[in-house]
Image: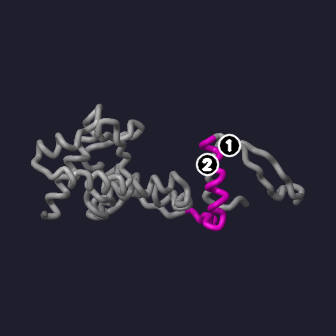
Amino acid sequence: MARNDRTVRLEVVKRALAESRRGVLLKSLAEKHGWNLRTLYRDIEALQAAHFPIVEEEGGRYRLDGKVTTFSGAPSPDERLALYLAREQAAGWKHTSLGRALDTLWNRVSATGGQAALFPVESVPWIATRAFAAIDDNQHRRIVETIERATRERLVISARYRAASTGQLTNRQIEPGQLHWAPAPAP
């Protein structure tokens, strides 16, 4: 099968999933387009591996997770530029769930037309950015992930830290309510 055939089929499957409220029966989709049913199952697996939130319902229907907002068509030049700038500015978030979500979105958008489609190189950009001089959070990755999880799930965590004002070690039980990303070390 030609690569273009698979690309077209994947786009048809994605559109059917996005437009369906009750879910899509793969058997019906295969019959409608003359495709092999097993091939459609492999396509669903490939889309799930690419982080498309596809849910299998009882009765063999497949649908997109209802919490997802889909968009159709290519993003506008301003939308591409906004995503590019956001990703550049959020380099310090790369190990958080939001950083991974931003990378996933970047990959999904850039997959529709490659890198050139994501950032318009044919014109002179009217805006530029540079990443903040951020702390290397990689050494604190486990701590950030723990606080992120506790914040999302409203969990109490034990924290041991050195108080800046007295230099004393302090133990606290805290329920974090919000994460604050500071892109540069405090003065």
Cα–Cα gap, marks 1 and 2: 8 Å
Whether residue 147 is visible:
yes
Residues tagged 1 and 2 counted as in contact (Cβ below 8 A): yes
For badge 1, the amino acid type reads Leu
For badge 2, the amino acid type reads Arg
Classify 136 as above or below 69: below
Relative depth, front residue between 50 and 110: 50
What percent of the width, then of the height, locates residue 92?
Answer: 56, 60
Q: Residue at x 87, y 58 (%)?
A: 169
Relative depth, front residue between 35 and 150: 35
- Would you say 51 lies left or right of 176 here? left
Classify 16 as above or below 2: above
Task: Indicate yes or no whether the magenta region holds residue 139.
Answer: yes
Residue 149 disc label = 2
Residue count near mark 2 (Cα–Cα under 10 Å), binned few <14, some 14–19, many ≥20: some
What percent of the width, then of the height, locates residue 140?
Answer: 66, 63
Q: Residue at x 75, y 44 (%)?
A: 174
- Would you say 131 lies left or right of 38 here? right
Residue 186 disc label = none
Residue count near mark 1 (Cα–Cα under 10 Å), binned few <14, some 14–19, many ≥20: some
User: For the residue labelled by badge 1, is the local secondary structure a helix, a strand or a loop?
Assistant: loop
Give the magenta part as a residue range: 132-153
Whether residue 81 is visible:
no
Task: Indicate yes or no whether the magenta region holds residue 159.
Answer: no
What percent of the width, then of the height, locates residue 85?
Answer: 44, 57
What percent of the width, then of the height, locates residue 134?
Answer: 60, 64
User: For the residue labelled by badge 2, is the local secondary structure a helix, a strand or a loop?
Assistant: helix
Residue 155 disc label = 1
